[in-house]
Image: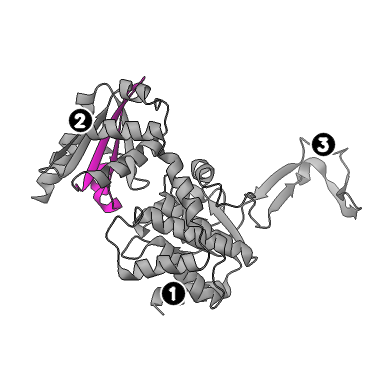
């Protein structure tokens, strides 16, 4: 057992409540792995809180997700009554089948709803799993209003490395719950995570990874439902736009980047004028599988309010320097910028940034 798994095993022995955190624009494979961990924790009656909400993800993968979005954290609320204003003489409680009543005896007249203050107390997590890199720990501050964070030593970061996120969660399940193997539903989530992270095993994979995929199938992973979900994205409209994107792509060996430009007419002809950034990221991901490899891929598309741009890479580390120069906070393996006034303005802005990065390397 590795040192990291020993730490996680120890956390579970001492922890009653867990929080699971991800980035706002997190990739599907991380969110699927996160959901698998959430479901196993809920199955074990362990209080679990998951942030933030990802409505597009939940809609896309609804066949694999549980219908109830309720977390099982106990909630607390302060009921504040101003002492000087009300001059409380006595407090007591009365309870019947329908209500728990707080009886307040005041020497300064009756209380009303404007007098009493209800203040929710954020739930407290004893430990947390973060589905992002340690250098992105600043993201945790976004959640402080919704949950009381655990101490730093009880926060586990699941970083990208040679193991997929699906494998990481499977290792945690086996380490913590020993011989209690994942259910078919959780195995399906893990297999979906594995498929999406490896691009359906297109990317270089190890024999160990293939054996892991086979093990998930033996545990009842529903690959047919996963196939249906993934194929829903690749409708004729998506395929037509992907074809146009391929025709409008050029590669740049010096800057180690690919450049793709889509006009408003391209989007109108393929009925994708109002598509979301995640849709265009999916276009860019598929595009990267079809062209000669480049460290970065850039996509520019035309909207009514100007030109929007997206930069994507296989690893976040390849995007961080560019995002920093562009003055954009990186949330995932892609970021968006704009609007720009024209394609040439957008291209020039990114070209200058990439040339600056190249000069720093020299």
Q: Is residue 130 visible?
A: no
In the image, which is nearer the foreground, mark 2 or mark 3? 2
In three-dimensional space, the C-alpha distance between marks 2 and 3, rounded to whole angstroms, equals: 61 Å
181 or 30: nearer the viewer: 181
Residue 156 in the image: above or below residue 174:
above
Q: Judge whether residue 327 is colored magenta.
A: no
Earlier-in-chain disc, 2 versus 1: 1
In the rendered image, residue 132, in percent from the top left (x then y), is placed at 39, 56
In the rendered image, residue 116, in percent from the top left (x then y), is placed at 76, 41
**Residue that extends furthest to the left in the rendered view of this protein:** 362
Residue 22 in the image: above or below residue 355:
below
Q: Magenta segment range?
A: 294-323
Earlier-in-chain disc, 2 versus 3: 3
Helix, strand, or loop for circle 3? Answer: loop
Mark carried by residue 311: none
Q: Counting other residues with Cα less than 10 Å from the Cα at mark 2, is it few (<14), some (14-19), or many (20 or more)?
A: some
Q: Which residue is mark 2?
A: 347
Left-right relation of 14 to 155: right
In the rendered image, residue 342, in percent from the top left (x then y), is placed at 24, 22
Mark carried by residue 5: 1
Q: Which residue is mark 3?
A: 112
């Amino acid at each position: 057992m590795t040192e990291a798994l020993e730490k996680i095993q120890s956390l579970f022995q001492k922890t009653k409540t867990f929080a699971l955190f991800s980035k706002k624009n997190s990739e599907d494979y991380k969110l699927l792995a996160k959901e698998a961990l959430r479901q196993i924790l809920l199955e074990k009656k362990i209080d679990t809180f998951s942030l933030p909400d990802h409505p597009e993800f939940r809609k896309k993968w609804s066949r694999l997700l549980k219908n109830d979005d309720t977390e099982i954290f106990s909630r607390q609320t302060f009921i504040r009554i101003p002492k000087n204003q009300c001059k409380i003489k006595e407090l007591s409680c009365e309870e019947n089948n329908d209500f728990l009543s707080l009886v307040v005896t005041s020497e300064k007249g009756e209380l009303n709803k404007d007098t009493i203050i209800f203040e929710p107390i954020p739930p407290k997590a004893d430990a947390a799993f973060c589905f992002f890199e340690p250098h992105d720990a600043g993201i945790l501050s976004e959640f402080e209003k919704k949950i009381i964070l655990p101490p730093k030593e009880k926060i586990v970061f699941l970083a990208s490395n040679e193991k997929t996120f699906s494998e990481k969660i499977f290792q945690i399940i086996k380490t913590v719950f020993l011989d209690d193997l994942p259910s078919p539903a959780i195995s399906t989530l893990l297999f979906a995570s594995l498929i999406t992270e490896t691009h359906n095993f297109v990317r270089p994979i190890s024999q160990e990874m293939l054996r892991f995929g086979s093990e998930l199938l033996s545990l009842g992973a529903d690959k047919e439902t996963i196939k249906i979900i993934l194929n829903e994205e690749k409708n004729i409209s998506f395929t037509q736009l992907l074809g146009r994107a391929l025709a409008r792509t050029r590669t740049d060996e010096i800057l180690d980047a690919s450049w793709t430009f889509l006009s408003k007419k391209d989007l109108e002809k393929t009925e994708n004028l109002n598509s979301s950034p995640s849709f265009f990221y999916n276009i860019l991901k598929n595009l990267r599988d079809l062209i000669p490899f480049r460290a970065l891929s850039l996509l520019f598309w035309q909207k009514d309010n100007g030109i929007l741009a997206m930069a994507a890479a296989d690893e976040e580390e390849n995007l961080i320097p560019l995002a920093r120069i562009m003055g954009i906070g990186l949330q995932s393996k892609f970021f968006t910028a704009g609007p720009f006034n024209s394609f040439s303005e957008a291209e020039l802005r990114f070209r200058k940034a990439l040339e600056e990065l190249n000069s720093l390397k020299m």
